[in-house]
Amino acid sequence: MKRQKFNTVLFIMAAFVLFPTVAFTENTEKDTEEDQLTGSYLDIYHAKEISTRLGDSNRLQLYRLKIMVANFGDGDEKSKLDTTSENYKEAMKSMYKRHYLASEKKLTANRSEIQSMYATLAKKYREKTAEVLNRTADRLVEIELSESVEPGAFANTHAKLISRARISLVVGYNQLSMGEAEEGNTRYPEAISHFRVARFHAIHMLAAMAETEEDRKKILDEFKVDLMDIENKTAEKES
């Protein structure tokens, strides 16, 4: 009888130990393999810090990418942005579940995806910026060649316009050069900022050198999306 009672007690104690373990196993099976990463307390502590920092940084960069892709992105870039945004969401879900080792891993990979998209867009911005700067320079040379060089005619020429255009082009090409340097150092957000400033000077100067008011309006309309983008806005929202 005593042996039977002893066995019963052992069975009950084993049940209390076994059932919570089984329940825990069932819960973790719902998570992905990456969510079950294990590490020391110090590893988890550092992963939490990194995840928090990358979560804020990646979100800001995704917001900026969304504007640029909306303005100038093609179908492939829009698809990549959707995928990158979804990966960011999954990484943040891991962080909110306090799976910090997994969230650090996912957010670090997400940062690489964002960097890759920035590299593609920086090249596109550089090419567009160089194109409008060259077009503005061509227009300036046309005006310079059309000017009278006879003594006494200086006051009646486009001297002030030419002077302003030269200054704007110097600023614009300097900004283009600075952007190229930042691009070479893989600092793509900074590069795009310089390219935007360069385009601002080129577009407004090109419009100022238009022959007629109608031509000026056509130029501003042609570069409407560019001017919205320079302000970090989308043309879609403006519409």
Image (cartoon, rainbow, N blue to C red):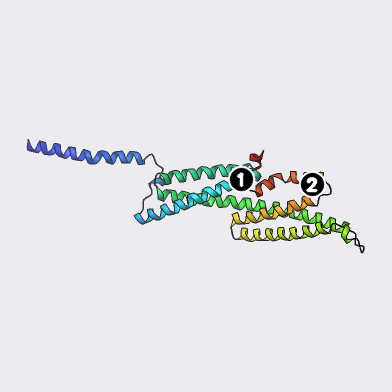
- Mark 1 belongs to which amino acid? Ile
Give the camera-side residue of 79 and 72: 72
How far is the residue under mark 1 from the one under mark 2? 26 Å
* Mark 2 crowd level (few <14, some 14–19, many ≥20, 10 Å Cα): some
Left or right side of 175 for 155: right
Left or right side of 216 for 31: left
Residue named by callout 2: 216
* Residue at the limit of the structure toward the bottom, as seen here: 151
Give the camera-side residue of 236 and 181: 236
Residue 193 in the image: above or below residue 239: below
Q: Position of residue 13 (x, y in %)?
A: 18, 40
Q: How many marks?
A: 2
Left or right side of 139 for 232: left
- Foreground: disc 1 or disc 2: 2
Location of residue 93 (image quadrant):
top left
Q: Position of residue 113 (x, y in %)?
A: 54, 49
CB atoms at circles 1 and 2 under 8 Å apart?
A: no
Q: Position of residue 212 (x, y in %)?
A: 83, 47
Residue 127 appears anywhere in the view: yes
- Image quadrant for the N terminus? top left
- Image quadrant for the C terminus? top right
Q: Of the two numbered discs 1 and 2 on the same chain, state the one appearing first in sequence.
A: 1
- Mark 2 belongs to which amino acid? Arg
Residue 17 in the image: above or below residue 132: above
* Mark 1 crowd level (few <14, some 14–19, many ≥20, 10 Å Cα): some
Secondary structure, mark 2, is helix
* Residue at the limit of the structure toward the left, as seen here: 1
Secondary structure, mark 1, is helix
Left or right side of 168 for 121: left
Q: Residue at x 77, y 54 (%)?
A: 136
Q: Position of residue 217 (x, y in %)?
A: 78, 44
Residue named by callout 1: 67
